[in-house]
Image: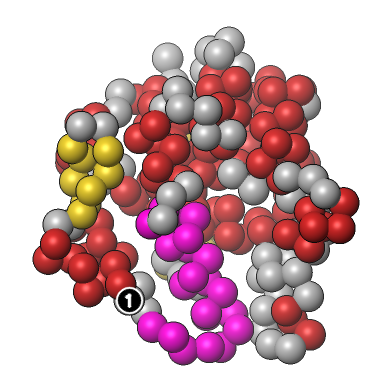
Amino acid sequence: MVKKLERQQVLKDPIYGYIHVDYEVIKKLIDSNLFQRLRRIRQLSGVQMVFHGAEHSRFSHSLGVYELAYRFLSVKELKDELNEREELLFMVAALLHDIGHGAYSHAFEDVFDVDHEHIGARMITNRHELRDVLSTIDDDFASDVASIILKSGKYPLIEQLISSQLDIDRLDYLERDAYFTGTAYGHIDLDRIMRVLHVKHKQIVFSVSGIHAIEA
């Protein structure tokens, strides 16, 4: 049985107001040393040298992507497609999607010719600090989270939500990066995008009425 916290915990966030935590496993993952290290990795590599406000971290971005997963599960069509285990897989994969990033984020990958998704998947399945937490759900939970991050095709609907042309990773970093750099290239109408989201044949689709929000 998936254990919930006795009382919902929240973290204040400049983009969404609050990050909501209902499950004990999410709280333990956030508190882990491997996740806390993301506080020391800047989201935008060295961009703060040009935009002095761009000091935000992979930690805050990862929490933001998790919060979007949490909010997307309020969409009835999506919630109807997922059981409780799959909902938790979605939220955990969203939270840990960048766990494998090194210093200077993507610049680190270019210099050392590595891939943060492959590193993250190995951390999830091999590092006891993460695996032991995930194994409290079931023995296969850690490997299933890793498979989503690697886009192996086992959970195509969840993979599309986390990594596609219009995914929750992108929805967070576009809004968050604009906020912290002080640039103004358009606000994302998240509520509208959620309202026009549908699930057809295990694929995420959007109503044509939401085209302006998506293009923006």
Q: Compared with residue 155, is residue 97 higher up or lower down, i.e. above or below?
A: below
Residue name at image x 58 percent, y 60 percent: 61
Image quadrant containing the C terminus: bottom left
Image quadrant containing the N terminus: top left
* Residue 19, visible in the rendered structure: no
Viewer-proximal residue among 197 and 205: 205
Task: In the displayed orientation, state which residue is furthest to the top.
Answer: 139
The quadrant holding residue 35 is top right
Residue name at image x 53 percent, y 88 percent: 183
Q: Magenta: predominant secondary structure element?
A: helix
Viewer-proximal residue among 110 and 176: 110
Residue name at image x 45 percent, y 23 percent: 154
The quadrant holding residue 90 is top left
Amino acid type of the residue tagged 1 in the rendering? Ala
Measured as percent of width and height from the top left, residue 153 is found at 46, 27
User: In this picture, which residue range is highlighted in magenta?
Assistant: 166-186
Measured as percent of width and height from the top left, residue 44 is found at 69, 70
Q: Mark 1 points at which residue?
A: 216
Viewer-proximal residue among 73 and 30: 73
Q: Magenta stretch containing residue 185, yes or no?
A: yes
Measured as percent of width and height from the top left, residue 158 is found at 40, 36
Q: In the rendered view, does 61 fall on the left or right side of 9? A: right
Measured as percent of width and height from the top left, residue 56 is found at 66, 70
